[in-house]
Image (cartoon, coloured by chain):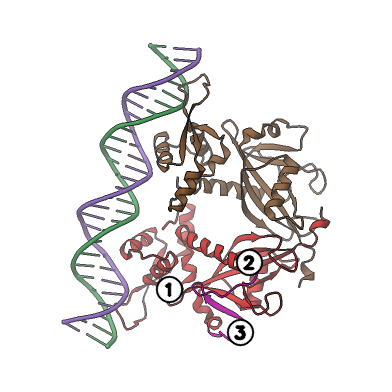
Chain colours: A red, B brown, C green, D purple
Amino acid sequence: MQNKSLSIKVATDAIVFGYSPQEGISVVLISRKYPPFQHAWALPGGFVLNEESLEEAVQRELEEEAGIRVNYLEQLFTFGHPDRDPRQRVISVAYMGLVNTSRYQELKASTDAAHARWFPIKKLPVLAFDHKQILAMAIDRLRAKIHYQPIGFELLDKEFPFSDLEKLYSVLLDKTINRRNFSKKILSFGILEETGNMSERTGKGRPGKLYRFNTKRYRQLLKEGFHFEI
Amino acid sequence: MQNKSLSIKVATDAIVFGYSPQEGISVVLISRKYPPFQHAWALPGGFVLNEESLEEAVQRELEEEAGIRVNYLEQLFTFGHPDRDPRQRVISVAYMGLVNTSRYQELKASTDAAHARWFPIKKLPVLAFDHKQILAMAIDRLRAKIHYQPIGFELLDKEFPFSDLEKLYSVLLDKTINRRNFSKKILSFGILEETGNMSERTGKGRPGKLYRFNTKRYRQLLKEGFHFEI
DNA sequence: TCAAAAGTGTTTCACTTACACCCATGA
DNA sequence: TCATGGGTGTAAGTGAAACACTTTTGA
């Protein structure tokens, strides 16, 4: 029985999301150098090495292929359909990662030369392998998860105006949200703290207070049975 | 790079839950015939064959090792720590399954001879590999999931008295639940239908109506945006 | 007629929803 | 002083939680 499974390879793929108020949600894709699917866009990823854990593999590949270090990473799903790779049997453990895009502007800027690029999820290219399906699942997971886990903050700057958070939610959930009720709810959790600073004057309207996500407080609340829900 | 990953093996493990009002939640374990962990209890599972999907692998192993066919199966998590198997690098895709225990009494009965057995999760033996950890995650998932998906019904008979459902929830959530409010809520969803039959007279108290989970109606409601929540 | 379990009505309370007005800033 | 966006008070509506009483069965 072991012989029959000798030829299955193990890979990881990473779906890394970023956010900007202008572009909405974006994802990191790389342009494939070699066949199959040469020059096509694909999720960053690759084979798992013998000595490394799955998470380490993902992080290594992200570093190598896109120069990215994520601040949130979770296992998404393992895709193992026998013919998802035309060359041989490959199962892929997909991970979803979140980063603050502003830290990786370069990636976003170097559109042509580099082979790693941000793509707004509204304007995706054709993807290699079953990566379209994997990405779709990741988007679903992200949309579902912001309801019950405060992962939205991973996509924002360390200090952010409340309106950024609000915009993030309305983009992700694709609906307008009531500003008053949203802020009442989020603030009632007690997991945000004012930094004391105000947002940069953009030339329009009143500057808003800047907030910071209080990780310590959140962990404390979790222990006490708190449940984030929006 | 491909060479370095040649020796990683791919396996699946299955956590199959059953339920009875007497024992509560039970799980299928098998006694290992060969080293490592010879004679220790472990989750049913094994290596994935070249031509089969991950789900097919799980179902085949369950059939072979315990004679079980589950009526619900979902991928749980992929465990890939480098030294989770003392022999070699093995990553395991764990699946959680649910069955109606009364269909597999044999398993439960043949305690000594057979090497597959039901164990109440309150009375677990020492487990091989990292199976304790895997099982713990499965239990968490089950507990979390009955809140927002009607998977509890998979554990009950096709026709069941309301009290069975109620007891299942109170066992799983480990708290007493208000009979009145629970039934009001569940029935308000419209996913249960009366069969017209009454429960067997057990000798005590008034017999209750039997109910059946209406899968068609549930799917219909899902399309209309219905969300199960208890 | 009593014990045990099923079945149901109604009030209370909390939270969500909806709506409207005021404040600070730059042009 | 106007446009733009930030900040907050409160009434109305909805649904969950709490509680108690009635019904059906076997002993």
Q: Disc 1 designates what residue?
A: A159
Q: Is residue A70 above or below residue B164?
A: below
Classify residue B33 by image quadrant: top right
Classify residue A8 by image quadrant: bottom right
Q: Disc 2 designates what residue?
A: A130
| Tag shown at residue A114 | 3
Q: Is residue C9 left or right of A17 when viewed as pictured?
A: left
For label 2, the SS is: loop
Q: Is residue B85 above or below residue B167?
A: below
Q: Residues within 10 Å of mark 1 (few under 14, many from 20)?
A: some
Span highlighted in magenta in the image: A109-130
Query: Can residue B130 be seen?
Result: no
Tell me the subunit letter for badge 2: A
Which of the two discs, 1 and 3, labels the residue nearer the N terminus?
3
Q: Is residue A199 left or right of B5 when viewed as pictured?
A: left
Classify residue A135 by image quadrant: bottom right
| Tag shown at residue B95 | none
